[in-house]
Image (cartoon, grey):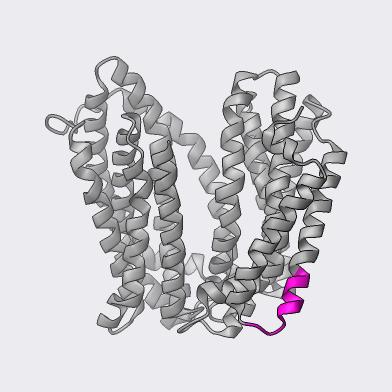
Amino acid sequence: MVQGAAGTGISRVTGLIRDGAIAYAFGASASYDAFLVALFIPNALRQLLGEGGLAAAFIPVYTSWQKRGQGTDLARSTLGLLLGVLPAVCALGALAARWYLPFLAAGFPPEKMGESVALAAWLFPLLGFVSLTALFGGILNAHGRFFGPAVAPAVLNLGMALGAVVLSRLFPRAIFGLAAGALLGGLVMTVALLPATLRYLKGPLQVWPLHPGLREVGWRLLPSLGGLVVAEANVLVDNRLASYLAHGSIAVLQYAMRLFQLPLGVLAVSVASAALPRLARAPSPGTDFARTLSRGFHLTAALVLPAMVGLLLLGQPILTVLFERGAFGRSDTARTFDCLAGYLSGLWAYALVYLFSRAHFALGRPALPFAAAALALGVNVGLNLWWVGVWGAFGLALATGVAGWVDALVLGGWLWRKVPGWIKTSVLARIAAAAGVMGGAVWGARILLGGQAPWLQVVVGVPVGVLVYGLAGWALGLRELVQGER
């Protein structure tokens, strides 16, 4: 697991490198808007057939059949099916782009739409590479090999960075260099895992008849499909409305979302993943379940609230350091920070959704998280239609933040009815006080630094915030959250 964590860390660092390279080459431009819309469908399908859905559905089934001595047969059958289906899916997606892209970005002018359609034809093969990599990674994970699959996305990130900075110079329209870099990174990513995977794929591929274990894999994919539809519908509505705004509006939403997702991916997912086994071991709403849920709730607050305050105070200099160079100008930084502020209104909410949804899964109620997400989607769409005309891209981001609270409150409210008493207001008050003291210290440091360089504000502000929050938390007794509540 340490190897997997190290690989994931490398992938996240290269993700920042990728985003910095894209910002340098394309900024918040019409071409990058076109690229993001062209990538929407391949990226949505890749989450189902690729990184998240297929691997999560395949591993437990593969492990089960491996105990019966048929794991290799299932792996060969799955690979044969993917090799037969993926080329057709990629070709169909590329050919149909001229019909579905006008629905995704109805506000694009004809030239921008034409560029997006052409980019979709380039980007759909990426779905094949990612899906094969996910299968290879699932097989390797099942055999206790974690580093390679975890670090594989770093290859894709570096390929896109290469495409943005180098390959873009070789194309008449530079944005196609980014697409070429994505394909190159995807190909290398897949090929890199192939030798290790072949050790567990002895014998010829089995295309027909299909292995019976594939039916179980398919059933396990269905919940992922429902969640994917809800999640991607939010992005679809945001992109469609943003396509009517100024050029670069989709791009600044994407840049802001990258920074917004960083604490979610590092902090919230870690807490929720650690809580899930304990929740599953105490599936009835009793004392152990309530204790685990309480600790997860307060630990999420203790980690996410200071992150939210820090990003609000230091978000603009952080964005400047990460992105403001080349084609990404000061006005792009300001627009991105506005969107980041809107998203941050729901940071704690989305962190709680990670925890609450896992609690519902442990209680055997997987339908409620889906229903809550669908309700949040309806709220998001309604607020989008209202606020986009008032605040533009910031309104779209703010609607996403508010919708997160709808999701969290529905899930948390039902848990409170079944397991009351797991929120301790005294603990929350201490967390809020520590985050407030930290925010005051960071704000004071920025005032003292005045007009100093943004990198200096980040270099000074981040350690000051961490140190002051740690000291304030220690003084207020929050160390119990790390050591385990007594």
Task: Choose top left, top right, bottom left or bottom right for residue 316.
Answer: bottom right
Q: Could you say where residue 202 lies in the image, as x and y percent from the top left? A: 15, 29
Looking at the image, residue 266 sits to the left or right of residue 193; the answer is right
Task: Choose top left, top right, bottom left or bottom right for residue 92.
Answer: bottom left
Closer-to-camera residue (249/263): 263
Total labels drawn: 0
Task: Choose top left, top right, bottom left or bottom right for residue 347.
Answer: bottom right
Q: Residue at x 61, y 39 (%)?
A: 271
Closer-to-camera residue (177/267): 267
Q: Residue at x 77, y 62 (%)?
A: 439
Vertical placement of residue 137 versus 31, above or below: above
Is residue 461 at all visible to an observer of this figure?
Answer: yes
Q: Would residue 445 be counted in the magenta stretch?
A: yes
Looking at the image, residue 173 sits to the left or right of residue 294; the answer is left
* Secondary structure mostly taken by the magenta-highlighted segment of the chain: helix
Looking at the image, residue 192 sits to the left or right of residue 486; the answer is left
- Residue found farthest to the left: 204
Residues drawn in magenta? 443-452
Q: Could you say where residue 212 lies in the image, as x and y percent from the top left? A: 30, 22
Q: Residue at x 41, y 33 (%)?
A: 57
Q: Residue at x 68, y 33 (%)?
A: 483
